[in-house]
Amino acid sequence: MQGGLTIREMCEATRVSRASYYRTWRSREPKQEQVAVRDALQRLALKHRHYGYRRIRQALKGDGWQVNHKRVLRLMREDNLLSIRRRRFMVTTDSRHGWQIYPNLARYMMLTGINQLWVADITYVRLRHEFVYLAVILDVYSRRVVGWSINRRLDSGFARQALDFAVRERQPNPGLVHHSDRGVQYASNQYVERLEACGITISMSRPGNPYDNAWAESFMKTLKSEEVDGRRYCDLEDTIASIGTFIDEVYNQQRLHSALNYVSPMEFETQLAKRPVETDAADGNPENQDSHSSLKPSASQFPQARRRSTTKQHC
């Protein structure tokens, strides 16, 4: 019923057969409905990080979506949302991919410059009929996005594209710490071997603790609120162009950051390059320490970094 008319009456008024109407509906409406349900599910799962698929299903039902628990579970598995469940489930998830899990080194670091700590994360972007995925790498000291990649496939190759971008642009010295969650994209042999070839030390978040990667989470929130949520991307190419422009021209070059004394990441790095070496801060004088921190972690805290720093590797 639409505007008081039944489907039959509307078809007769427009001289369209009901068979043609239903054929068109089956080819368009279910796909749009699926994308809308998936988007609602993604938002709920990210908002309620400890909700399982049954609670997510009830939350969807409360928002007016008619969807059964099996479909919710399947969508959450496909979008890798079950990995942020309770600690009990995290252990199972971590063991599923079988790759090595690394300790969290980032939580102990106090930074003195760029290319000391990079953080990596992945999020989804909704298009009209599909979802695509964005991987980013952020330099924590300057808050600059140093690498990013967008792809339809959520795999280690897609994450490595962002890493290759960052390494090519920054050419970091051995000893840099790369921090991420425990997802298979970052724990796979392909990704780990690339990090090790560049002399980069690996760090991963603790199970079920999103605060361990708060820097990347903060960027993703900014991206969604200032770019993604107000746009309707036509296709993958449009998404790459629009988000690329936001990252490279707006976020890195123009957006003011409170943590950087209200300058952009690139302006901060430009100012940083002009500064003399602040030896007092390195000695631990709190009066000379900025909001980023100013103590370089000792080699005893990070034996991996100490071993790798002895030999220069080419990546």
Image (cartoon, helix red, strand yellow):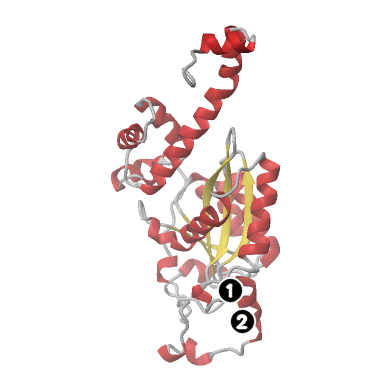
Residue 17, placed above or below residue 144? above
- Coordinates of residue 257 in the picture (x, y in percent): 53, 71
Label 1: which residue?
114
Label annotation for residue 272: 2
Label annotation for residue 292: none
Residue 215, placed above or below residue 278? above
**Callout count:** 2
Which badge, 1 or 2, is on the more N-terminal residue? 1
Residue 88 image-quadrant placement: top left
- Badge 2 marks a residue whose secondary structure is helix
Residue 21, placed above or below residue 42? above
- Badge 1 marks a residue whose secondary structure is loop
- Coordinates of residue 180 in the picture (x, y in percent): 48, 56
| Residue drawn at point x = 33 percent, y = 37 percent | 59
In this rendered view, identify the residue nearer to me: 174 or 87: 87
| Residue drawn at point x = 54 percent, y = 49 percent | 229
